[in-house]
Amino acid sequence: MIIEDNLGDFILVEDFLFEQIEAPVISHCVSYSDAKELLSLRDGAFDVILLDLSLPDKTGAPLITEILGLSKGAPVIVFTGYTDFTFGVKSLSLGISDYILKEDLTSMSLYKSIVYNIERKHFISALETSEMQGRAFAKQLNFILEEERARIAREIHDDLGQQLSGLKMSLSSLTKFGGTNDELAVTVNSMLGDVDQSIKSLRFIANELRPVIIDKLGLFAAVEWLASRFEARTGVICKLRIPPLQTSIEKTKEINIFRIIQEVFTNISKHANASMVTVVIKNQPKKRLLFQVTDNGIGIEPEQLSQPLSMGLLNIRERAKMIDADLVITRPAEGGTTVELTINLNDKENIDS
């Protein structure tokens, strides 16, 4: 498709195309409205769109945005008589495939641009499909992993916990039959202490695998538990601001949000050297929910945010993508680091906590 209102320029471009391509099929539009109608009628029929930026009914960036929205993935190559380099760069950032000045246009440069951008579009489309498949697999794998964690945690808590509790009862009853044997009493008491410690360790491991509180009381209670546990373990003061009206969230999202906040707390304890952490949860417009964790530590360096091998940040980003959440990590002017996770509630209504 060639969208060009100047007949002389259209004939020139048409000649260039016939010079390099055998029997090209060309559709010509002289205005944005004509192009819109044809693109709507012939959905996905064009391999490439050549667009002049100065049309009678629309020009510049708004024209680019509209045509890109109608292009159905076809590469859009802009050619224009204006030599505004700044706008050329801006138009590329809007999503066009190439920007060519009419005065520099030749049959070969046009042909190379068309072939290159069609092939690039195919390659990008294949990459996007592959990435979508990879994300779908990762999402399913994550779901299976969390279910397996929950199962193992239940078995550890229920089966091993009951066995250790039974052992504790047996040891306690043993002291009743020991009479006045002080040596036996000391040994039994030592064993009881070991069993108590094993029970505590078992509960800790089960909670690390899958905190029972998130299944029984939900995400908000689990975040509160996570913050209090972090404060007790590290000595870092933890402040929470949670809305009184709490939101119903899909279970898969709850687990991933919890894991993200858990990873943020881990990073703070390892790297931030902070004395205070603030956790804020609040409702946003358009039925979105914001989770914000801010510490007053040394702050994350900009180059650290782009490190590909930072497993903690990679884990946070991938989990955010799994639940279609927006993740922003910044270093405020006053210091420290702020992690903001904004999720779409999918029209879930607020429920009274």
Image: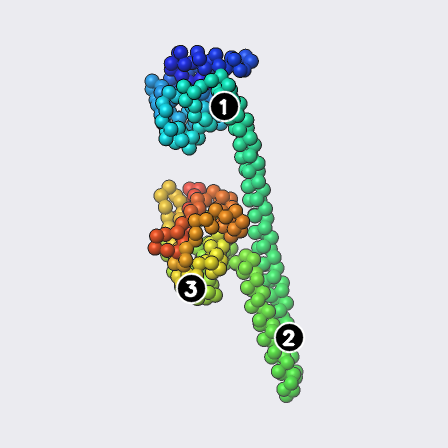
Q: Residue 264: x percent and y percent?
A: 47, 55
Does any portion of residue 79 appear in the rendered image? no
> What residue is drawn where x is 62% and y is 64%?
160
**Marks 1 and 3, Cα distance to the nearest angstrom?**
58 Å
User: Camera-side residue: 47 or 44?
Assistant: 47
Across and down, in percent, residue 297 comes to 41, 59
Q: Is residue 291 left or right of residue 185?
A: left
Residue placed under numbered mark 3 in the picture = 236
Q: Quadrant of the C terminus?
A: bottom left
Q: Position of residue 242 (x, y in %)?
A: 38, 55
Image quadrant where residue 9 sits: top left
The crowding category of the residue bearing disc 1, from other C-alpha atoms within 10 Å (few below 14, some 14 to 19, many at least 20), is: some
Q: Which amino acid does label 2 sit on?
A: Ser
* SS at circle 1: helix
Q: Picture quarter containing residue 30?
A: top left
CA gap between label 2 and label 1 equals: 82 Å
Location of mark 2 (residue):
170
Can you say whether 211 is above or below 81 in the image?
below
Residue 19 visible in the picture: yes
Give the label on residue 270, or none.
Answer: none
Distance from Cα at disc 3 to Cα at disc 2: 41 Å
Q: In this view, does 87 lie to the left or right of 49?
A: left
Q: Which residue is drawn at 63% across and 79% down?
A: 188
Pointer 1 or 3: first along the chain:
1
